[in-house]
Amino acid sequence: MDTKDIEKYSSAYTLSDMEIFVFPELMYSLVLANLMSPILWRWRELDTFRKLDGKGSYRKLMRLRQFIMDEFDFNLDLETWGLTDKNTELQRFAPYLSPPQIAQSNALFGYEGDKYYFDVNIRKHFGLDKYTTDVIPYWKTETLEAMDAFRLKPGYGRAAGECVSLAALYAAAAFIVGGVPLEDIYMILTPLHSQNFLDLQDGILTNNRRLVTKAMWFNGTEISDKAQRALRHEQVTVVTHRTGYIHCLYPEATIAPQAYTHFRARLAEYLSTGLTFTVFASFLRAVPQHQKYFQICRECHGQPRFLPAEMLYHYEHGSPYKIGDSTHDKLLAEVSEEDFVPYELPGRVRCDLLCEFLTRHPTDVRTPRGREALHKLLGRTIPEVDKLLDDLTNFVHIEADLPGGDKHFSAAGALEIPADWSRAEIIEYLRRARSRSPVADLAFYAYRDMESCDWRPFVKSAVERCPVSLEKVKSMSIAEACDWLSRLPAASIYDGNRLAQPDELANYGTGDGLEKAFFLANILRHRIPAQALRVEVDGSRVILQADRTYEFASAKTLQGQVDITPAGAITIASQA
């Protein structure tokens, strides 16, 4: 490996947001690593999913959503994976992107988003305002094993992960558990978020722990509003797929052009909706300042009764019933008779007459003709009708800011994995694909497969980008740190000959002897930088040579020798 390769491959262990932005191949590599995870395959054997054998992907996805909601927390603790600083990161990525380009990609480096994010004070919103110097937190993405291991971390009773981790999990689980073909799964990354578009029925977006159908996207609730933020307010920086990726800055793209064209069309369909009364009622739910111009009418004993729209929306809170959908009449039945009046309220449009108009005259508010028709209907009553129509147009249509199609497309080894393959078949296929597919090759690094991967990227990440382990023992002497390590459970969060990074050991309080040796190597590297280090692994026996000899017992069956010079050069004398 040359310097650039080692930088990219070591990033497969750190998986920070910036690393994924600079090396977009990493995003799908993590999905493939999760496809190989035994944890994910054990989910298929759970009763909750076995009961759905033979059912369609949509049913399985809805069950998967509930499972993830029950088992995983959304974690946005910016200090989970420690701190770094802007200058270090900017210098590190200088060979790939300039500082202004990096500033477009991450809130830590100056990204503020559009007017929406200025209004909500994005740095304060994400807890970044306390970092007033060059010190910034890592935003690292977790493997499924690391997400599952949050159960071991103090203060967490369940698995957990941030948005990129959850997107990678959903993409893998949709395929393995939900049976959604990889062909139909597209990953969408923005500077502040990551989600997936599943090309199923009218389209489904994943959003952190949730799934959002098109009907849910346009239901006007607070949850839907939060789900819309990224695509409504941010530039899409990367789209990745089984055929490759496209990046907003790079002139080269590896995604299949026909796949990207299809994705753009399907996403556009998902982000637009026709105007029905159900949609209009959702609009008023989302933009409540316009409710004051509408009234609800119902018949009681043959006589019309009227109610201010905002009062009925108040009744919606805490009720399972909604205005404008099939439960509308049930919601009306919950309203106290005292809240109705026997006369039309002046200065308000009757929603029943609006519903009748929209049913008889399909109207597209985005066209001059449709806008004129609504203006004529509503303008006689509503003084701010133009503002209402602008807001309505914005509600029913979102134009995603996707990377342009003016790229040089080149094939990068599309992956063909049928949904009926076993885990062993998938792993063997990916092994064979490594020579032609950089994404497949990187997947084994993200998977932590030390048997088949060059150890240098793992070691580089372990001794350069694991600040949590340094913080964990900063008040301890070396002898005390060794004693602390010896008292930790000797179990890795990764099975077989796969290894956790020092920060994972620090966060989860458990680790194999070989992982403990690299943890200690990281501590010694930073406390005694002039000291050369050597890690010798011979099956169950691990020796760390430094200021003295440290010995650990390992349940792994690896063999090898790693040397780290005071200058930071890493050489592998042997590995097996």
Image (cartoon, helix red, strand yellow):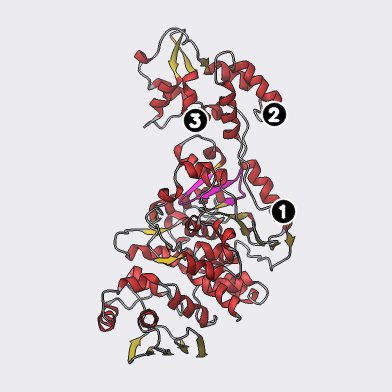
Q: Secondary structure at mark 1?
A: loop
Q: Quadrant of the N terminus?
A: bottom right
Examine the image and state in which quarter residue 317 appears. Answer: top left
- Callout 2 amino acid: Thr
Q: Which residues are magenta?
A: 197-212
Residue 459 highlighted magenta (yes or no): no
Question: Whole-percent x and y of residue 305?
Answer: 44, 11
Q: Secondary structure at mark 3?
A: loop
* Residue beneath disc 3: 287
Give the residue at x 64% y 16%.
Answer: 376
Pointer 2 or 1: first along the chain = 2
Question: Whole-percent x and y of residue 340?
Answer: 40, 13
- Callout 1 amino acid: Gly
Residue 200 highlighted magenta (yes or no): yes
* Residue beneath disc 1: 405
In the image, 543 versus 103, the foreground residue is 103
Residue 532 located left or right of residue 416: left
In the image, 426 versus 52, the foreground residue is 426
- The label number, if any, that marks residue 367 in the structure image: 2
